[in-house]
Image: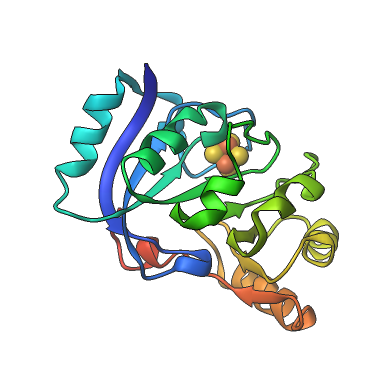
Amino acid sequence: MIRVSEVFYSIQGEGRNAGTPSVFVRLEGCNLDCPWCDTPIRKTGIGMDDLDLLQKVRSFCDVSRVTITGGEPCLQPEVFRLFQGAGYLVDVETNGVIFPEIDGWPAIFNGGSLGTITVSPKRGHAVEWRRWLAYGDHLSVKVVMDEPEWTSETIESSPGIVYVQPRWPYTSDELNQVLNMVKKHHKKAKLSMQLHKIIGIQ
Ligand code: SF4
C-alpha cells in the first residue's frame, strides 16, 4: 500500500517548472522534521493501492504530468516507477537525503519519462551530490532561505543553477534577504517564489 496525504491538480508554483500544470501526489511521511515545514499534512494520510492511486490521478482529465512530493517521496520510491510505467512524465521533489535505489534508474528516466528531480537541501542534512548528478539535466536544486551563511555555502556547493525562495509566510525583511542573496550569487542563483501561495491556490 502507498501512503498518500493528498492528490490534487494544480499549477507548479516554484523552481524550474513554475507555471506548469501537473497533478500533485503528496506522499505521507518525512525523514526530517523541519521546524518551519509548511506541509503539516505530511503527517496524515491513507493507504492506497496502485490502481486506486492511478485512478485518482486519471480522474483529473488527461493531464500527463505528475509531481511526486511530500513529505519525502524517496521513502516510497515505488511510486515513481508506478507513474513512469503508466506513461506519465514524472517530477520528484525531495530533500535529497535519501537516494532512491530503483532498478533501472536513472537510466530509464533519463531516457525520457523524467521531468525534473528537484532536490531541496536542508541545513544539518548532507546531500550526496555525487549520486544525484547521475540525473544530469533532469536535476534541479531549490533552496529555501535559512541561516545566511549556510544558504550562501549551499548555493555555491550545489550543482547548476539554484532556485532560492523565502519561507512562507515571509516578511518584507525576509524577502529582501532573499533578493540580496540571489544578487550576491548572480552567477548561480535565481529567485523562486511560491506562486501558488501568492495567488491563493493549492
Ligand atoms: S524535508 Fe520538507 S516536508 Fe520534510 S519536514 Fe522538512 S520541509 Fe517538511
Q: Quadrant of residue 65?
A: bottom left
Tell me which corner region of the image, top left, top right, bottom left or bottom right, holds residue 11.
Answer: bottom left
Residue 135: x percent and y percent? 65, 54
Q: Which residue lies at the image location 59% right of the left edge and 63% below the top edge?
A: 166
Give the colour scheme of this rendering. rainbow
Q: Is 82 positioned to the left or the right of 77 in the image? A: left
| Residue 102 image offset from top left, x and y in percent | 59, 32
Residue 154 visible? The answer is: yes
Residue drawn at x 23%, y 56% is 63
In this rendering, would 117 be left or right of 157? left
Q: Which residue is drawn at 52% across and 31% down?
A: 77
Q: Viewer-proximal residue, 175 or 47?
A: 47
Count of numbered tags: 0
Question: Residue 104 at what x, y percent from top left?
Answer: 58, 37
The quarter of the rendering in which ligand 1 is drawn is top right
Q: In this view, does 61 lie above or below 11?
A: above
The image shows residue 106 at horizontal and vertical percentages of 61, 46
Q: Is residue 12 shown above or below 126?
A: below
Q: Which of 107 and 95 is in front in this view?
A: 107
Tell me: 16 left or right of 142: left
Q: Which residue is drawn at 37% across and 16% down?
A: 1
Residue 168 seen from this side: no
